[in-house]
């Protein structure tokens, strides 16, 4: 039997290094892409990477802030191994020791041990970066496509004349100046192929992006309505986000974003008669009231997710854009004007969540920066619907008798 042993010192507070091994949100920024933990003796964990790898196991020893021991079994492993993590307090922070033991003999075991040696070394580098910046090094080092991807569902196929497209990634919006924008892609395109590989969904697209670096150029194919187009796409560099460094700065940033978006909504919607709010451009297209109902649900989900993140829960509460969520969002409102005010109140919930952070978050700089990075996108989803709102208003006015 042989083992892997790695040691490193971190200037972060000991309890925050320990949290990086036990808090799902923190784990997702340096370990797996999706982590679930129940940190107690006989509790479980799973780490999943979007490249298709996963590991799981049970905790056999949990000494908070000092020691963790768990079984370890990954996809393709020859057998179960064991990982022990020691958290040793030092004068300037913490000395972290990871011991991965239990590898057998033979070529397959040696290959497995060598692979995990590389993965642990990479994980230590990612953890160091994360504790210093609050950002996921793996994401920051990746090339940037510059799109907001969405699902090509039946509704989008119908509304955008895409019934002939079986599958693909619907480009909800394009980041101005990003790689996709500079390469000629547009919002409402459907990305169906990259570098000769089909992109049936986001995960196909993500796997291809991971093969490249900023500056690489690859061929892509999109459907733009009935037209199939080919482009040479050059990946951009992912910009380092400007994240508020203190709790006070974070509250101020969220407050400003919310106030800006509320003002923008007023410019588009305030003062409209109710017949404009209720007008449906087509049977399968949303009225303004339905758009507002959708945004009420979505923005409340964002606030709920922020609350979950504060408590270490990492799964976003996704739901389908169905009639249930529209009924839920519209409940309790009697007019479009009331729904507009309701959406503003829901946006204000983002500010309330940011202001209510407990000390366990405000004193954990890496976690505070992680949540701060999430909150820099406050109300961005609302802005993606502005053009839809304007188009609906224009259609409503055009339908009225002269």
Image (cartoon, rainbow, N blue to C red):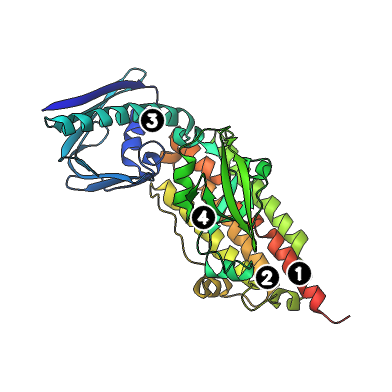
Q: Contact, CB < 8 Å: mark 2 with mark 4? A: no
Q: Which mark is residue 393?
A: 1
Instruction: Using residue 215 as the reference point, say whether residue 306 is left or right of it.
Output: left
Residue at 50% over, 61% down = 167
Q: What element carries label 4?
A: helix
In three-dimensional space, the C-alpha distance between marks 3 and 2, rounded to whole angstroms, equals 45 Å
Answer with mark 1 or mark 2, whichever residue precedes in sequence. Answer: 2
The mark lying in front, picked from 4 and 1, is 1
Answer with mark 3 or mark 1, whichever residue precedes in sequence. Answer: 3
Answer with mark 3 or mark 2, whichever residue precedes in sequence. Answer: 3
In three-dimensional space, the C-alpha distance between marks 3 and 1, rounded to whole angstroms, equals 49 Å
- Look at the picture and state if 252 lies above or below 398: above
In three-dimensional space, the C-alpha distance between marks 2 and 4, rounded to whole angstroms, equals 22 Å
Q: In which quarter of the image is the C terminus?
A: bottom right
- Name the residue tied to disc 2: 288
Instruction: Using residue 108 as the reference point, say whether residue 306 is left or right of it.
Output: right
Residue at 21% over, 26% down = 4
Answer with mark 2 or mark 4, whichever residue precedes in sequence. Answer: 2
Q: Where is residue 307 in the image (x, y as percent from the top left)?
A: 46, 52
Q: In which quarter of the image is the N terminus?
A: top left
Q: Residue 127 carries which label?
A: 3
Q: What element carries label 1?
A: helix
Instruction: Using residue 346 as the reference point, say whether residue 389 is left or right of it.
Output: right
Q: Contact, CB < 8 Å: mark 1 with mark 2? A: yes
Residue at 62% over, 42% down = 232
Q: Which mark is residue 303?
A: 4
Q: How crowded is mark 4: few (under 14 residues within 10 Å), some or many (20 or more)?
A: many
Q: Position of residue 366 (x, y in %)?
A: 45, 34
Answer with mark 4 or mark 1, whichever residue precedes in sequence. Answer: 4
Q: Where is residue 277 in the image (x, y as percent from the top left)?
A: 71, 74
């Amino acid at each position: 039997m042989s083992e892997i042993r790695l040691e490193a010192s971190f200037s972060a507070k000991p309890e925050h290094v320990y949290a990086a091994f036990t808090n799902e949100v923190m784990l997702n920024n340096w370990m797996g892409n999706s982590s679930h933990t129940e940190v107690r003796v006989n509790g479980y964990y799973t780490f999943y990477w979007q490249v298709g790898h996963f590991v799981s196991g049970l905790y056999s020893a949990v000494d908070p802030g000092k020691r963790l021991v768990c079984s370890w079994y990954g996809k393709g492993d020859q057998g179960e191994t064991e990982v022990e993590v020691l958290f040793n307090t030092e004068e300037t922070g913490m000395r972290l020791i990871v011991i991965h033991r239990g590898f057998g003999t033979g070529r397959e075991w040696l290959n497995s041990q060598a692979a995990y040696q590389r993965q642990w070394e990479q994980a230590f580098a990612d953890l160091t970066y994360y504790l210093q910046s609050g950002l996921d090094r793996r994401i920051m080092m990746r090339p940037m496509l510059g799109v907001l991807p969405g699902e090509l569902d039946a509704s989008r196929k119908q509304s955008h004349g895409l019934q002939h497209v079986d599958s693909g990634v619907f480009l909800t919006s394009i980041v101005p100046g990003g790689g996709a924008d500079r390469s000629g892609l547009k919002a409402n395109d459907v990305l169906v192929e990259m570098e000769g590989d089909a992109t049936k969904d986001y995960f196909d697209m993500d796997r291809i992006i991971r093969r490249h670096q900023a500056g690489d150029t690859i061929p892509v194919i999109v459907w733009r309505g009935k037209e199939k187009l080919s482009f040479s796409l050059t990946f951009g560099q992912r910009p380092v986000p400007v994240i508020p460094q203190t709790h006070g700065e974070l509250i101020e940033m969220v407050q400003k974003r919310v106030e800006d978006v509320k003002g923008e909504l007023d410019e588009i919607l305030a003062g409209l008669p109710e017949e404009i709010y209720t007008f449906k451009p087509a049977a399968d297209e949303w009225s303004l009231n339905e758009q507002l109902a959708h945004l009420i649900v979505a923005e409340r989900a964002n606030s709920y997710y922020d609350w979950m993140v504060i408590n270490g829960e990492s799964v976003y509460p996704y739901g389908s854009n169905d009639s249930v969520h529209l009924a839920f969002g519209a409940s309790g409102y009697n007019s479009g004007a009331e729904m507009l005010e309701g959406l503003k109140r829901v946006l204000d919930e983002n500010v309330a969540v940011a202001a209510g952070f407990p000390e366990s978050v405000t004193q954990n700089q890496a976690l505070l920066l992680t949540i701060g990075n999430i909150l820099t996108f406050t109300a961005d989803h609302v802005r993606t619907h502005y053009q839809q709102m304007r188009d609906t208003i224009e259609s409503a006015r055009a339908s009225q008798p002269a």
